[in-house]
Image: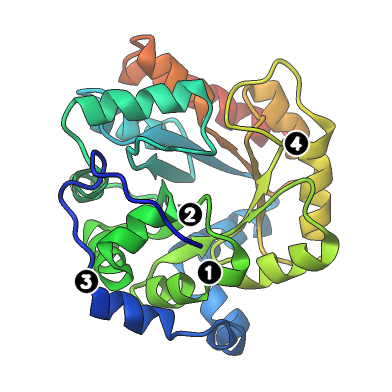
Amino acid sequence: MAPSTDSSALSDVSLPEKDAEKANRLSSERIAEEGSEKAVAGAIHSKLLSIRDKKKKSLCCYLMGGMSSDWQDIARAIENGGADIIEIGLPFSDPMIDGPVIQHASKVSLDSGNSPMSAIDSISNLDMSIPVVVMTYYNIIYRAGLYRMAGRMAAAGVSGSIIADLPVEEAGSWVATAGDAGIENIMLVAPTTSLDRTKVICDTSRGFVYCVGTMGVTGERDELPTSAKEVAAKVKSVTDKPALVGIGVSTPSQATSVCAIADGVILGSAIVRRVLEGENARGIENFVRLLRNAIDSL
């Protein structure tokens, strides 16, 4: 991978070359050797297993860091509404997996003076009792330095990371470095991923496996694509790690439908759109509670 640099998003970070070189010497074999022992150690994995053991489904909600002046209040409202995990997006000007809604939220955050690092630091002020996952892109991590980024996340109270553009063949260094800092790195499986490759991705993933519900970018859909259930079934056929479906799930009824197979759901664009439209923390809490009640009805 040859990560690009983005000066507008990375104005407060620099590349510590020795750290990057040291991280790149860590091998994927080390991840395999640590295996399940490392995978079960984290707060995310333990929490989701506990929920599944109670025959319940997990709810993860996404919010773009810094997208509004009250985004921290909204993050707390998401927890109060019943989310089990909150995913915080780091603002970035080239969010390749994100659709127009989250792209706009990222631009709003950057235009307000936020950066990836400032968004991470702000997480320490959230005082959440649920695990916090950061969603970002690998060139941000590479540019900052793997050890520096993992340490910064850990210091802010982050429990997990989702690196949307990091392929499993190149994930070993970050998975190991993040793991040493107590960060569980969550890998993505797409509807088009072969079964053999799915197994490799699931073995590498920590916390849970992110099942991409539909091909394309993030965004709300009027109907739940059939691929959302199919990718969850594929993942569950090769791993016992929790399988959560995101991208393509937008409503309480869609969340309920996909949870018939998946261990949980991830909703982002439906929440971010409401915030961009001026919905306050109380309104977001009510929406999250609708999602919670829907999946709890199973």
| N-term mark: 1 or 4 | 1
Q: Determine whether 36 is above or below 60 in the image.
A: below
The answer to whether the residues at label 3 and label 4 have Cβ atoms under 8 Å apart is no
Residue sticking out furthest to the top:
277
Q: Where is mark 3, residue-wise?
A: 16
Q: Tag 3: residue type?
A: Pro
- Provide residue 20's location: percent of width, then percent of height: 32, 75
- Observer-nearest residue: 65 or 164? 164
Residue 239: quarter of image: bottom right
Q: Where is mark 2, residue-wise?
A: 163
Q: Residue at x 38, y 9 (%)?
A: 277
Mark pair 1, 3: CA separation: 19 Å
The answer to whether the residues at label 1 and label 2 have Cβ atoms under 8 Å apart is yes
Name the element at disc 1. Answer: loop
Q: Where is mark 1, residue-wise?
A: 171
Mark pair 1, 2: CA separation: 9 Å
Mark pair 1, 4: CA separation: 28 Å
Graded by Cα atoms within 10 Å as few (under 14), some (14 to 19) or many (20 or more), the crowding at tag 1 reads many
Q: Residue at x 54, y 63 (%)?
A: 207
Q: Nearer the viewer, mark 1 or mark 3?
A: 3
Mark pair 2, 4: CA separation: 23 Å
Q: Tag 4: residue type?
A: Val
- Provide residue 233's location: percent of width, then percent of height: 83, 51
| N-term mark: 2 or 4 | 2
The answer to whether the residues at label 3 and label 2 have Cβ atoms under 8 Å apart is no
- Provide residue 32's location: percent of width, then percent of height: 62, 84
Q: Nearer the viewer, mark 2 or mark 4?
A: 2
